[in-house]
Structures are given as C-alpha cells and as structure tokens.
Amino acid sequence: MDPFLRAAIEEAERSLSEGGIPIGSVLVHSGTIAGRGHNRRVQKGSAILHGEMDAIENAGRRSAAFYRECTLYTTLSPCAMCSGAIILYGIPRVVIGENQSFMGEEQWLSDHGVEIEIIQDPACIKLMREFVENQPSLWSEDIGV
Amino acid sequence: MDPFLRAAIEEAERSLSEGGIPIGSVLVHSGTIAGRGHNRRVQKGSAILHGEMDAIENAGRRSAAFYRECTLYTTLSPCAMCSGAIILYGIPRVVIGENQSFMGEEQWLSDHGVEIEIIQDPACIKLMREFVENQPSLWSEDIGV
C-alpha cells in the first residue's frame, strides 16, 4: 500500500482508539509528510477539525508555493468544507481512500483542476462502515445531516 | 447598523488590535450570537481559523437542525473553505460586510440555495483596504495566492 495512505489510515485508527470519528489525513510535500491529523469532533469538541482540516492545520502556516507542491491523502471523500480548503490553497492532487461511505465534493474539486485518485481501500471502507453502523447520530452531526 | 454586523466588525477590529488580519464573524441563532470569532492566522499560527471558521468553532458542536436556523455574519466575502463550511452545515443565510476587497464563493453558495445579503459597509471596506495595502504578503498567504 502507498505509505501515505497507510499513514492516513493510522490516523483514522488513532481517532477511533480515542473514541473519535475514524477519518485520517496527511498532507505530503516533496515526498515527506508535512502535516498529519484526524477528525477531532469528539476529542476536542470541534465543529471544524475534520481529518483533512487537522492535517492542514498541523502543517502550520505555509505559502501558496508550498501548497501547490502538495498531495493531500484522506481516508474518506472530502466534504464541502475540506474541499473548500483544498481549493483555497490550490492543493493540486488528492488521494481518497474511499467514497462509498460518503461522497464529498469531488466534482467541484475536478472542476477546479484538482487531480483526484480514488483507491476504494478495504480498510478505509471497513472503518467507516462499522463506525456509521455503530454511531449514526455522531456521523450525522459530522456531516450536517 | 445591524447589531450583528456591528459585532462582526468589532471582532475584525479586535483582530487588528492583536496584530492579526481584520476579518470578523458571528453565527446568529434565533436572534442571539451563538459563536463569535475572527481570523487567527497570526495570533494562533493557524491555517484554518478564518473569521467564519472561528465563529463556527466557537459555537461548539451543534446539530444540523440548529445550523438550519442560523445566519452567519462576516465582514468579508467568504472564501472557498468558509463557504464550504456554510454548505456542509446547511447554514441558510449569510450577511456579507463587503466583497470589494475579495470576492469569495458567493455564486457557489447561491447555487446551493444559500441566501446572501451584501452590505458594502464602509467600515468593512476601510479595514480591508488598509490591511491589504499595509500587509500584502500576509494577505496573500491568507487566501493562498
């Protein structure tokens, strides 16, 4: 498996072990992880720290030139907020673990020239399937439905 | 002036007095401010705490039903990330202080049924005009250009 997708899955598993939502992400620049993160809704009482947002936040303040050399890995298709962050910063490539449990704003990303790769990784799918079954109200809260 | 736009401007002024980017926001539910915030790029070294994101974060974890009764006030047209948060949570109405200094994803919001009101408030315009003139590189960083 791609080591960066592996790292995103490890973040998702860490979140689950903390009692949180199992979605993880890493921001990769020039072959190195610049920021890693996971959903912190439960852990920090946060409405904005989805996995992708946490990874971007943990990469710190960066220039536009930096983001334009990045790939964002995420275990789940990015929602409107996370897709908006990708577009704001001009991140050119996104690797998505799966989009069967939730379909984010992939079309909007593509329309903005973002290259998308969908893996449909069994581990990502299993993490989300079990979580949604076990905690449907928490999942609804996280995606605003 | 609308007291909620006034509160958003106070947040922007507070950010400026802290050495930060002068953009503020309040999330209003049933006539009461549920969360208020301002850009924290400088103050917290944050890549994701735009004014609108900070206001949403400070409102805490909320249900979809709550957000659907909210109006978000912001001193400046919301970028892709903040617009994405508005769409994620189904916030139905956004009052924008001005969009002359920066035009965000207003069309995308409208396409999703979000009601938008543009004030073109002189105080909001002045805050941003002076900031962009004085700190162009910080402003570029904030909008990823």
Image (cartoon, coloured by chain):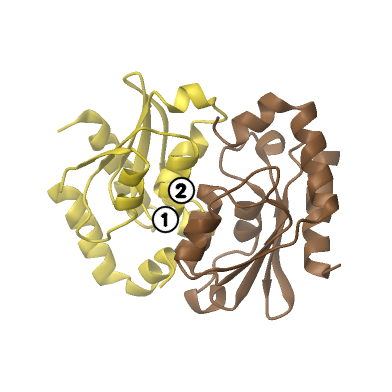
Chain colours: A brown, B yellow
Looking at the image, is A119 positioned above or below residue A38?
below
Crowd rating for badge 1 (residues with CA inside 10 Å; few <14, some 14–19, many 20+): many
What's the CA distance linking mark 2 and mark 1?
Answer: 6 Å
The residue that appears at 73% across and 39% down in the rendered structure is A21
Q: Where does residue B102 sit, x and y in percent of width and height?
A: 27, 60
Residue of label 1: B80
State how many labels appear: 2
Q: Give the image quarter of residue A70.
A: bottom right
For the residues bearing labels 2 and 1, Cβ distance under 8 angstroms: yes
Q: Where does residue A52 sit, x and y in percent of width and height?
A: 63, 54
Q: Is residue B46 visible?
A: no
The residue that appears at 37% across and 50% down in the rendered structure is B15
Q: Where does residue A92 sit, x and y in percent of width and height?
A: 55, 72
The mark found on residue A111 in the picture is none
Looking at the image, is A46 positioned above or below residue A37?
above
| Residue B16 left/right relative to A76 | left
Q: Amino acid at mark 2?
A: Gly
Quarter holding the C terminus of chain B? Answer: bottom left
Q: Chain of mark 1?
A: B
Residue of label 2: B84
Q: Chain of mark 2?
A: B
